[in-house]
Amino acid sequence: MYKSFATSLCQLTTAFRSLDRHLNLVEERLARVGDVSKAERSHAAVVELSRMYLDCLRTILGAATSHGADTGQQPTDHMILASRHTVLTDMCQTWLDQGAVPDLFNIKWLHQLTGAIGEADRAIRPQWEAYAGWGRSALRGFVADQYDCLLDSVGGLTEEELNAPGVVGDWSARDTLAHVLAWEEYGWMILSQWPEPKAGTLTRWEVGESEEEANALLLDHYAESDLIDVLGDLYTFRRRTLRFIDDCDDSRFDSVGSYGLGETGSLTLFLLSMACHCTEHALQILDARAPRGR
């Protein structure tokens, strides 16, 4: 029993790289629901976390160390996840000392985990700006992994499956990839003009009265694009982004600039957010495939 628990704990720790990124999505969604009770919001968060947790175990096992495996290095995100990992292992050690091994798929336990991670997350939030400490090679490896996760997520799907709704609301896998492409184009606008985009170059994305409306309008831009074109463009932006990282001098790599839409921050954090956007939607596609055994 304890061996099984230890194995599950190891899997959960490995899955943290994706799971932890997506906790922020839960918070954003709940913040937009103003007329729901605290208990209902809490339940929604736990349900969402449970789904993402299962996604991570099913699809991301081993990915955290993939580009460090040959060198024996620690996972590249070790610096950021150290505090979260400590919180998790401390909680688990307490349970072990008490002789009470929790069910890792139990909603109540996940609820406790949500709170513990949230506390750790708030405590180390400033460290997110320290991703430059990874070094160029580690950040590049992380970014490449996330692009590959997205591109691989549709492998083996038929045309009918690619166009079937239900990945994100009514979006199909093809729609989801087109959505990512829209924001990859935005990301390249930011990177290619770093640290300050020229006036008028971001107007295409400054649309809609809400995030949902903006995404719907942006998706219309690709209504006539077939999947081959979308995948080709995504691969192009993967190549451009990795080349951008390679070509940055040290001062630019460590610099702060405009993200557009009224936001500013470090270049490394912007690159990270672009990469995690790919992972977010790759997981959604993989989750939609699971019931069909694809």
Image (cartoon, rainbow, N blue to C red):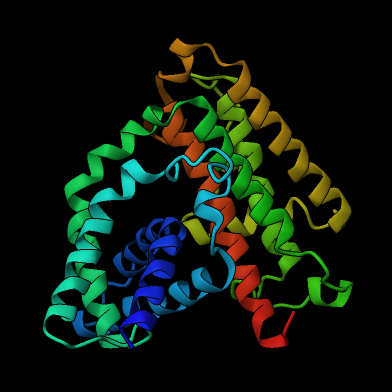
* Residue name at image x 86 percent, y 49 percent: 229
- Residue 112, picture quadrant: bottom left
Could you say where residue 127 lies in the image, as x and y percent from the top left?
27, 38
Picture quadrant of residue 244: top right
Residue 94 lies left or right of residue 177; in this view the side is left
Displayed quadrant of residue 172: bottom right
Q: Pick the residue in front: 128 or 215.
A: 128
The location of residue 138, given as percent across then percent down, is 50, 34
37 relative to 168, above or below: below
| Residue 2 is at least partly visible in this image | yes
Task: Say which residue appears at 32% left-offset and 33% top-offset.
Answer: 129
263 to 193, vertically: above or below: below
The number of numbered badges drawn on the structure is 0
Residue drawn at point x = 35 percent, y = 71 percent: 9
User: Is residue 38 found left or right of 5 in the rendered image?
Assistant: left
In the rendering, at what x and y percent does residue 107 appear?
31, 87
Residue 123: image x %, image y %?
Answer: 16, 49
Q: Is residue 80 left or right of residue 83?
A: right
Is residue 208 visible in the rendered structure shown here? no
Q: Check the picture and name the quadrant holding the N terminus.
A: bottom left
Left or right: where 198 falls relative to 235 = left
